[in-house]
């Protein structure tokens, strides 16, 4: 057993300056303790890594880069986008979950990676509780489209045909478990019709087949479809949010078109590893809010079909939990799995 020992130290006069130096030394030592991220109003002093858990050149990667460009100014440092694709976004997201909780590494999170993936995959490699929700960027509606020569002019006509001809309608998607797949399955269930699901590896291929009427209709996010809608090669019959979207003001919602309970939208935001200090989360959140308030950036994103939505950190965290439960229930009800 160790005995308590009291050391008798000689008394020397200690000057005030020496005390200050001693205190500074102790404080500096505390800063070097592994895992401790001290508060610092000057942070960040090094580039921030913004992980895009998608392949370069895709829609998610493009959005990540657009946001990263806007954050460089407010953060007064460069924001470097790093692609870590695979498993529907799970690989890159899991990487950030295990990153140091210092605010230097954040991830672009979506309805999929922070929601539906946990019900579609047996293993994701992370939990949404491994993250601190930093800020919502925006929400995006999906649109139901047909080819310009399609006989269907309204959702009502499409559904009427589906009810009279079970299994004859076909719906394209961007792949199993994607937002477009879930949207098709939700439509089938809400309308009480049988629809053949035709998954594609890329939305661009699905669009070509819908335009040529090899497939009857397609539901995907509006930024992907708006160029073809405006160009006249696709015809939008409805959007999936409860309210009409600014980029397609003449297109009714599915709720207006006979499916009052139908609502689906995609969303994206920034997430940091669990345990990241509040002052750094606040700094990142403030930078996002500055970007979202830019009239020019707002115009750019609105034209792309993204509705920027400033929320507090607490409001965003509540939204993530709410959507996790809502979309999880949808996936379970539809019985969709990937592995």
Image: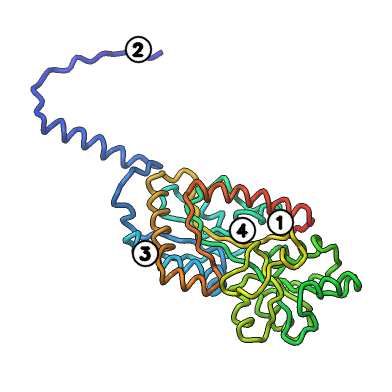
From mark 1 to mark 4, how far is it between C-alphas? 12 Å
Looking at the picture, tell me which residue is in the foreground, 327 or 2: 327
Q: Earlier in the sequence, mark 1 or mark 2?
A: 2
User: Which residue shows up at 49% across the image and 61% down it?
Assistant: 51
> Looking at the rendering, which quadrant does residue 49 occupy?
bottom left
From mark 4 to mark 3, how far is it between C-alphas? 25 Å
- Is any atom of residue 176 visible in this view? no
Q: Earlier in the sequence, mark 1 or mark 4?
A: 4
Is the residue under label 3 in contact with that under label 4 (CB below 8 Å)?
A: no
Q: Which residue is mark 2?
A: 3
Q: Identify the colour scheme used.
A: rainbow
- Is any atom of residue 77 visible in this view? yes
Tell me, for residue 120, which label it has, or none: 1
> Is residue 338 shown above or below 227?
above
Q: Secondary structure at mark 2?
A: loop
Q: Which residue is mark 3?
A: 72
Tell me, for residue 111, which label it has, or none: 4
- Label 4 crowd bin: few (<14), some (14–19), many (20+), radius 10 Å: many
């Amino acid at each position: 057993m160790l005995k308590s020992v009291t050391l008798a130290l000689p008394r020397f006069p200690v000057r005030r300056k020496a005390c200050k130096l001693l205190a500074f030394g102790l404080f500096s030592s505390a800063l070097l303790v592994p895992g401790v991220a001290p508060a610092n109003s000057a942070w960040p002093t090094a580039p921030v890594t913004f992980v895009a858990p998608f392949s370069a050149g895709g829609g998610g990667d493009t959005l990540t880069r657009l946001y990263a460009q806007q954050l460089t100014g407010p953060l007064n440092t460069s924001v470097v986008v790093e692609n870590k694709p695979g498993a529907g976004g799970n690989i890159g997201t899991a990487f950030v979950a295990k990153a140091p909780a210092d605010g230097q590494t954040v991830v672009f999170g979506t309805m999929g990676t922070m929601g539906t993936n946990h019900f579609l995959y047996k293993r994701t490699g992370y939990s949404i509780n491994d993250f601190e929700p930093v800020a919502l960027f925006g929400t995006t509606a999906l649109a139901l489209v047909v080819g310009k020569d399609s006989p269907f002019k309204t959702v009502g006509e499409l559904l009427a045909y589906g009810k009279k001809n079970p299994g004859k309608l076909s719906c394209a998607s961007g792949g199993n478990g994607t937002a477009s797949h879930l949207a098709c399955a939700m439509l089938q269930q809400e309308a009480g019709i049988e629809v053949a699901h035709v998954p594609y590896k890329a939305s661009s291929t699905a669009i070509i087949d819908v335009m040529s009427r090899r497939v009857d209709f397609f539901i995907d996010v509006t930024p992907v479809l708006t160029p073809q809608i405006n160009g006249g090669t696709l015809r939008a019959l409805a959007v999936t949010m409860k309210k009409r979207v600014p980029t397609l003001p003449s297109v009714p919602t599915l709720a207006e078109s006979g499916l009052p309970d139908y609502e689906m939208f995609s969303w994206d935001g920034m997430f940091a590893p669990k345990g990241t200090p509040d002052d750094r989360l606040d700094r990142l959140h403030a930078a996002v809010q500055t970007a979202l308030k830019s009239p020019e950036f707002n115009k750019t994103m609105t034209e792309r079909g993204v509705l920027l939505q400033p929320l507090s950190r607490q409001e965003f965290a509540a939204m993530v939990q709410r959507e996790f439960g809502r979309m999880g229930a949808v996936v379970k009800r539809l019985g969709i799995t990937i592995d």
